[in-house]
Amino acid sequence: MKPTLHTVAREFQEIGRDFHRRGWVLGTSGNFSVVISTKPLKLAITASSVSKGHLQSSDVLVVGADGRPIARTAPRPSAETLLHVAVVRARTAGAVLHTHSVWSTMLSERHAEKNGLALTGFEMLKGLEGVRSHQHTEWLPILDNDQDIPSLARRVDAVLLDRPDAHGFLLRGHGLYTWGDGLAQARRHVEILEFLLETTGRMHQWP
């Protein structure tokens, strides 16, 4: 049974407050989405330019597969809506979460020339769906940011096709995208990946 817009809005509000408190969605950064229909594809997604730490129910709207609002009176959706659509289609995801933490931003710049960041040897990796050992190596692709969202969405689709084992990706100088079969799994992946990014960043600071 797919979630209702009202239920999704309440969950987004709670997640937004939590992520804002942790410094992962400051200002108007970040965006959240949940699939509420598959045939046809419809996503509940946060509106553009709103604080995720102070979301109102009116800040959540429904968009179609083209990224456009279903209702004529709906607010403007996140500028990155088509990235959410690309992830949902490539991963058959039920929810997509995007954060703008300090560590994801810094590491996306530091490792940009390698087109990705390897995370390995950490027990917390086992929090990622399907991972059973700390010896797992998680490759987090890094894509150059682009204000041409349709073009960026196509590159996201290509990267996810090339890396079917990836649980997320970074946009350079921008932040983290991850997903799950629902909000609970997507939220867990945010927590795991943000922990691993901060740990890796702090280890880079060691003498």
Image (cartoon, rainbow, N blue to C red):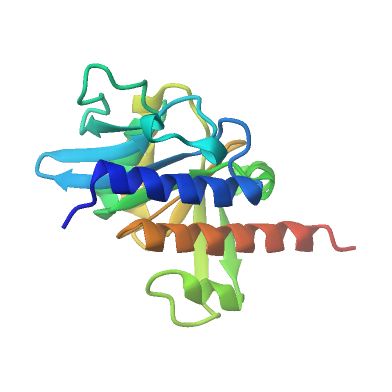
**Residue 26 on image: x %, y %:** 63, 37
Q: Residue furthest right?
A: 207
Q: Quadrant of residue 40?
A: top left
In the rendered image, residue 33, in percent from the top left (x then y), is placed at: 35, 43
Q: Position of residue 110 (x, y in %)?
A: 69, 45
Left or right? Give the position of 78 relative to 39: right
- At 46% from the left and 45% from the top, the residue drawn is 13
Compared across the picture, whether 108 is left or right of 152 comes to: right
- In the picture, the quarter occupied by the N terminus is bottom left
Query: Residue 112: x and y, percent?
Result: 61, 43
Q: Nearer the viewer, residue 25 or 98?
A: 25
Quadrant location of the C terminus in the rendered image: bottom right
Q: Residue at x 64, y 42 (%)?
A: 105
Whether residue 8 appears in this view of the structure is yes
- Left or right, residue 72 beside residue 95: left
Whether residue 166 is visible, yes or no, is no
